[in-house]
């Protein structure tokens, strides 16, 4: 019968732990830092666009000394001709410092023509709101609904080719954790080419599955000490 000494068992345990940690180590070393979070992007030609350093998020109770300092970062995904395929803007807490119970005043209203999922059920102490507009390039949707974002992408020459979708997700906790993620995405990354009626009717499923992965990744980021936000790969391969 094989016996292992206490020292040997400890050595094995350390080795196993080392292997486990190595297996969980991030494959991407150049993570994009934004406040308390780290943005781990999928493979592709990503470019940092702009960063906000001194933003302050006004929250309730109305106590200026407890307002939340925020940071923001924008990145763009470039295609083979250097065209913009996607723009991502992330805003989150500057630090992990906790605060007293936060009453959030932002809501998650229903909007015609927009997929809106209020996973928080209208709670006043947390936000869990996903909004998805499949054709955000139609009817001046971005200018009417997100004028600041529309102006910003125009100023940075970062507007994706039409047709593109708009994704917005806000997640906030009663303790003051906050994340807002907005993305403009070339539809070629979300909706596969279709042939025939059956494929056309099921063409939206990959985007819906990706939205679920995206929401979970944002929630995980708020819960993690290092704020790691592992952005899920788009459901359709990058155009060549």
Image: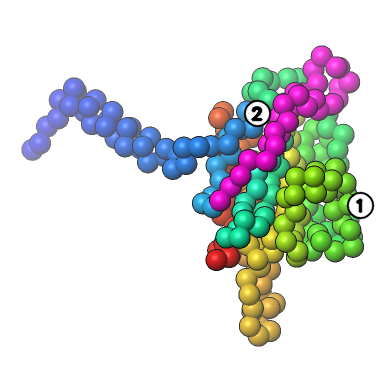
Q: Is residue 102 visible?
A: no
Q: Main secondary structure of the magenta part?
A: strand
Would you say residue 27 sits in the magenta stretch? no
Residue visible at 63% across and 83% down in the picture? 195
Quadrant position of residue 18: top left
- Which contiguous range is marked in magenta? 45-73
Query: Residue beneath label 2, please?
Result: 35
Residue visible at 29% across and 35% down in the picture? 16
Q: Can residue 103 be seen in this view?
A: yes
Category of crowding for the residue at label 1, using alpha-carbon neighbours closer than 10 angstroms: few (below 14), some (14–19), many (at least 20): few
Disc 1 secondary structure class? helix
Query: Residue beneath label 1, please?
Result: 144
| Protein image colouring | rainbow
Q: Residue furthest left?
A: 1
The answer to which of 214 and 83 lies nearer the viewer is: 83
List x then y, in percent, for residue 4.
14, 30
Q: In the image, is residue 65 above or below residue 20?
A: above
Q: Do the residues labelled 1 and 2 touch (CB within 8 Å)?
A: no
Picture disc at residue 212:
none
Residue visible at 78% across and 27% down in the picture? 55
The answer to which of 55 and 103 lies nearer the viewer is: 55
List x then y, in percent, for residue 164.
74, 61
Q: Residue furthest bottom?
A: 196
Residue visible at 75% across and 49% down in the picture? 157
List x then y, in percent, for residue 227.
59, 33
Residue 97 appears left or right of 55: left
Residue 13 appears left or right of 97: left
From the image, which quarter does the N terminus lie in?
A: top left
């Amino acid at each position: 019968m094989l016996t292992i000494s206490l020292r040997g068992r400890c050595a094995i345990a350390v080795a196993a732990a080392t292997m486990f940690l190595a297996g969980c180590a991030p494959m991407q070393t150049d993570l994009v830092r934004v406040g308390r979070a780290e943005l781990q992007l999928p493979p592709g030609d990503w470019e940092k666009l702009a960063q906000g350093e001194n933003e302050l998020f006004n929250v309730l109770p109305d106590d200026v000394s407890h307002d939340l300092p925020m940071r923001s970062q924008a990145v763009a995904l470039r295609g083979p001709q250097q065209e913009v395929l996607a723009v991502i803007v992330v805003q989150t807490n500057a630090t992990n410092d906790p605060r007293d119970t936060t009453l959030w005043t932002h809501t998650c209203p229903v909007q015609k023509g927009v997929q809106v999922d209020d996973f928080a059920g209208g709670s006043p102490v947390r936000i869990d709101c996903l909004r998805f507009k499949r054709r955000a390039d139609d009817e001046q949707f971005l200018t009417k609904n997100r004028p600041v974002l529309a102006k910003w992408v125009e100023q940075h020459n970062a507007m994706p080719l039409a047709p593109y979708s708009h994704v917005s997700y806000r997640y906030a906790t009663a303790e003051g954790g906050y994340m807002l993620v907005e993305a403009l995405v070339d539809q070629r990354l979300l909706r596969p080419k279709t042939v025939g009626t059956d494929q056309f009717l099921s063409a939206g499923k990959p985007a819906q599955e990706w939205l679920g992965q995206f929401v979970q990744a944002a929630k995980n980021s708020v819960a993690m000490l290092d704020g790691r936000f592992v952005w899920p790969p788009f459901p359709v391969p990058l155009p060549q």
